[in-house]
Image (cartoon, rainbow, N blue to C red):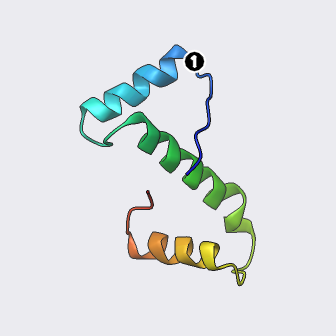
Amino acid sequence: MKVVTICLPESYIDGMDKLIKQAMYPNRSEVIRIAIRDLLVDELWGKHQKSGSPLLMQLEQMIESGEPVSD
């Protein structure tokens, strides 16, 4: 994985911290990874037919099986 530095509004940080405190996610990185994954599935990958891409196929299988998609 690569490290990406971003700036977020304080309200986003507070919201993420609440989710972590409620034990819904282990840390901020996981919250952000899941949010980005869901965005890509909805906005990018969801609009295309399944391709032969091994990574995309693996992600689709993990999502369909309900398996968490993380490191």
Give above or below for 21 relative to 11: below
Displayed quadrant of residue 67: bottom left
> Residue 69, how many percent across, how many down?
45, 61
> Residue 54, how many percent across, how many down?
63, 79
2 lies left or right of 62: right
In percent of the image, x 29 and y 43: which residue is there?
A: 24
Tell me if mark 1 has few (under 14), some (14-19) or many (20+) residues whose alpha carbon lies within 10 angstroms of its own.
Answer: few
In percent of the image, x 47 and y 69: which residue is there?
A: 63
Q: Amino acid at mark 1?
A: Pro
Give above or below for 23 relative to 21: below
In this rendering, the count of numbered labels is: 1
In percent of the image, x 36 and y 37: which residue is there?
A: 27
Displayed quadrant of residue 47: bottom right
Residue placed under numbered mark 1 in the picture? 9
Q: Which of 59 and 4 lies nearest the eye of the viewer?
A: 4
> Residue 51, how many percent across, how many down?
72, 81
Give above or below for 26 relative to 67: above
32 lies left or right of 5: left
In percent of the image, x 33 and y 42: which residue is there?
A: 25
> In the current view of this chain or complex, which residue is farthest to the bottom?
52
> In the current view of this chain or complex, which residue is farthest to the top?
10
Task: Point out the image quarter for the C terminus.
Answer: bottom left
Q: SS at mark 1?
A: loop
17 lies left or right of 41: left
Q: Which of 37 and 55 lies nearest the eye of the viewer?
A: 55
> Residue 66, how many percent across, how many down?
38, 69
